[in-house]
Image (cartoon, rainbow, N blue to C red):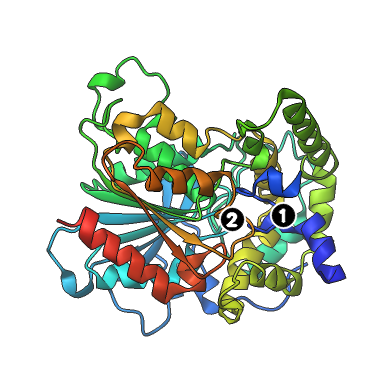
Amino acid sequence: MKASSSSFSAIALCLSPSWWCCHGFSLRQAASVQGNPPRSWALKSTTEATINDALPTNADTSRSAKFWKWKGHDIFTEMRAPAGGSSNKKPAVILLHGFGASTTYWRETMSVLQEEGHEVHALDLLGQGRSSKPFSKREYPFEQDAMNGEASAVMDMGENTDTKVNYSIDLWAQLVDDYARHLQLDDVVLMGNSLGSLVCLSAATGDFIGDSADRKNFTTYLAGNSVGEGSRLKGLCLFNCGVGLNSRNLVKNPSFSEPQRAVFNWLFDVFNSLIFDNEWLLRYALNNVVTKELLENALKSLYMHSPDRVDGELVDSFYYPAKLGGDGAIDAIRQIYCNDAGLTPKEYHDKYPEILDTLPLHLIWGLEDAVTPIEGDVGLFYCDRVANNRGGKGMTTIDCIKSGHMPFDDNPVETHAAMTKWLQKKVVT
C-alpha cells in the first residue's frame, strides 16, 4: 500500500467506510477546504426548506430534496416519485447509508427504483452527510470559527445544534420510524448498506423502542407490536451488512475463548484511547491530514469492480460534510467508534424470530469486499441461514455480486437486476 494511503488508514479513514474500520471483517482474518463544491451542494438550511434549486437544471419535478426537522435537528432527505405518476401502490423504499456516506451514493439505486414504480426516500442520518452534526459547546469549548466561516462560503448544511447526542443504531432507527410515520407511509421496504443495514434491522424489529409495557398493544410503529402485528414493513434488502455500530461486536464471535475476548477488547480500548477517543487528534486529522486525493484513493479501494465510478460527486459527498462539520463531525466520528456497538445481526434474529422469520429479507453481497467479506462473521451467518433455511420459511435469500463494499454503486447493473428480481418475486405480489 502507498505511504499516503497508510497514513490515511491510520487516522483520516475514520471519516469514511474504509477497509480498516472492518464493520464486518472477521478478527480471525486479522488475529482546509479545496476548491468549490458542485452546484448540487448549494443547499438551504431552513426548516423543511426545499432545495430543488440545488438540483441540475434538467431535473424533473418528480425529484425533490429538503431538510426535515427532527427533534430540533436538520435531516437531509431526497425523494423520487414513481415514474410516470404510477398509482400501482408498490411499497415505498427508504434507503439508509453506511458510515461516513450520504444519499449521494444511492444515485443509481434511486433511479432504478423510481423507474420500477416505487416512491423512493433516502436520508442522511443524524451526524452524517448534510444532516446536522450536533455537539455540546460545554464539551467542545474550542469550536473552530475558521471552519464555520469557510462552511458558509462554500456550502450550507444542516445546523449543528448545541445538543448532547448519544449516537447509536437505535437512535437512527427511531429517526427512520418517525420519518415514515411523519409521511404516513403505508407499505415500506427498508434497504441499507453496511452500518445502515443494522439501522434497518432495528427499525424492522422495533428494537429501538425498548421494553415498553404498551408495545404489545401499540401498533403505530413501522414494525408494529412486539411480534410484528400491524407491521407496515414489506421487506428488507441489506447490502454488505455490517456487524454493529462499530467493530467491537466482532468479539462476540462464539468461537472465541474468554482470554481471546479479553485481548481483543483490550486492543479496541487501546486504539480508541490513542486515536478515536482523542478529540485533538481527530481535529488535527480533519484540518491537516484529510485531502480529496487521499479520500479518493480510499474510496477506490472499496470500489473493487469499477473504481472509475469514484468521481468528483462521490468524493465531495464524503469530503465536505466531514471537513465542514466542525466539532459536530468530530463528536460523531468519536462516538461511532467508541460507543456501545449494539446488537449483531445474529442477535436481532435470535431476539425477534417472529418478525424476521416471516419478513422477506434479501442480502446482496459484494464478493470483493474487504470491509464486510462474505467469509466474515456476518457473511457466514447469513450464508448458513440461507443454505440451511433457518427459520423454516425460506424468507431469507442472498445474491453474491462481483463488487466491493458498495455493490449498488460499484456494479449497479448486476446489483439492481438482483434487487428488482427479489422485489418482484418476494415483495410485490
Pointer 1: residues within 10 angstroms few (<14), some, or many (20+)? some
Q: Quadrant of residue 208?
A: top left
Residue at coordinates 66% horizontally, 66% vertically from top-left?
Answer: 319
Residue 106 in which image quadrant: bottom left
Circle nearer the viewer, 2 or 1: 2
Q: Dot 2: few (<14), some (14–19), or many (≥20) neighbours within 10 Å? A: many
| Residue depicted at 54% across the width and 63% down the height | 367
Residue indicated by mark 1:
20
Q: Is residue 289 visible?
A: no
> For residue 81, what is the image quadrant?
bottom left
Q: Is residue 414 above or below residue 29?
A: below
Residue type beneath disc 2 = Pro
| Image point (58%, 41%), residue name | 245
- Residue 233 visible in the current orientation: yes
Q: Residue furthest bottom?
A: 58
Q: Is label 1 in a helix, a strand or a loop? A: loop
Q: How many marks?
A: 2
Give the spatial CA distance, label 2 vs label 1: 12 Å
In contact (CB < 8 Å): disc 2 and disc 1: no
User: Residue 373 shows which numbered tag?
Assistant: 2
Locate residue 191, reporting x and y percent: 39, 54
